[in-house]
Image: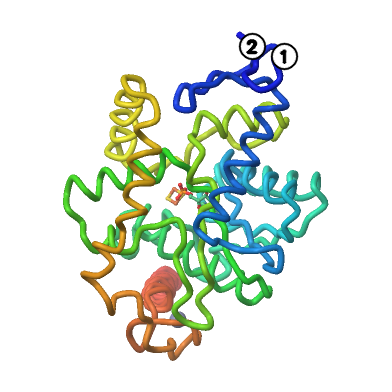
Amino acid sequence: MKCKICGRPAVIKLPAHNIALCEKCFEEFVLRRVKNAIKTYKMFTKDDKVAVAVSGGKDSLALWDILTRLGYETGGIHIHLGIGKYSDESLQKAENFAKKINSELTVIYVRDFFGTGIPEIAKITKRKTCSVCGTIKRYLMNRFAYEKGYTVLATGHNLDDEASTLLGNLLYWKDLYLARKGPVLPSTHPKLIRKVKPLVFLTEREIAAYTILRGIDYIYEECPHAAGATSIFHKHVLNEIENYSPGTKLHFLKGFYERKNIFARLYPEETKMQHECKECGYPSSGEICGFCKLRRRVKEKLENGRETTTA
Ligand code: AMP
Ligand code: FES
Ligand code: ZN
């Protein structure tokens, strides 16, 4: 198997693009795909200061590496979730990488805000772990990206992630999610930073190959609370379709992005954050934001618990 571009021995076959590429041409292909996504969806420019949300996993570390190589001004933000050994190792990977590329990493600890980690917060609030984790991560990433003077926040969501959530949302006609979904989530308030997903044109397999070639050391384990079987099943179904007809995944997602206004039009007011939270001053749809409400509940519960045990 020879590289379609330069004729050297190929290291990877890309059926969706009908090519095989050598190491060097594959790396260039990856950089080009990301550059293309940034340009196509007008994500950011060289004047922006890009906060990369780094979990310590392969996608976000690859993203940080790629954006740095493309010459963007970047820094990392890592949220330590307080999920035992998994969180400590994730932080370690993020820190090691930041050191390697000589870039700044901002680390935020969930326990500094709640007095405890995600599993305990989920138990106290009787909410699903991943849902409560999502609310907290989104809030902290936005807040600290803003406070640190970044102008845009980039996450490592890839083509498989996006296509599988799209499939799930379509199967159950979750119009509101479909209205919000996209490669760019624009800022609708001065303190709400624009969110972008520069890896949407790359599959999980392509990103994994890139991290191996670049020698990027990431955390292999999934979060022990990893999003249920449904999203994994949808990824599996899409891979079956992809094997049968290469390129379908990309076509599916791009086609949705081209038509996404159909859904966005159903909820014209939805994205507007009218208020500022009375406690933290960050955008909110009500008087107190979801994060501060959560924090109050957890603090009350922990303080009550402490009183009962010391009484
Ligand atoms: P997930 O929702 O876990 O699939 O992660 C999607 C993206 O969110 C990752 O690629 C990261 O960019 C970001 N992310 C997830 N967890 C963290 C974290 N603990 N700290 C910072 N960013 C994160
Ligand atoms: Fe949030 Fe697993 S990463 S619950
Ligand atoms: Zn608040």
Mark number, residue 8: 1
x, y (%) of residue 195? 51, 64
* Element carrying mark 2: loop
Residue 2 - label: 2
Query: Which residue lies at the image location 38% right of the left edge and 72% below the top edge?
Result: 294
Instruction: Choose between 93 and 156: the one closer to the eye.
Output: 156
Disc 1 residue: CB within 8 Å of ligand 1: no
The N terminus - image quarter: top right
Identify the residue at image location x=27%, y=39%. 230
Q: Is mark 1 on a helix, strand or loop?
A: loop
Q: Do the residues labelled 1 and 2 touch (CB within 8 Å)?
A: yes
Would you call the spot at circle 1 few (<14 residues within 10 Å), some (14-19), or many (20 or more)? some
Give the amino acid type for the residue marked by disc 1 in the picture.
Answer: Arg
Q: Quadrant of residue 246?
A: top left
Q: For this rendering, which residue is in front, 45 or 58?
A: 45
When the figure is inspected, residue 8 is found, relative to residue 71, above or below; the finding is above
Closer to the chain start, of discs 1 and 2, is 2
User: Tag 2: Cα neighbours inside 10 Å, few (<14), some, or many (≥20)?
Assistant: some
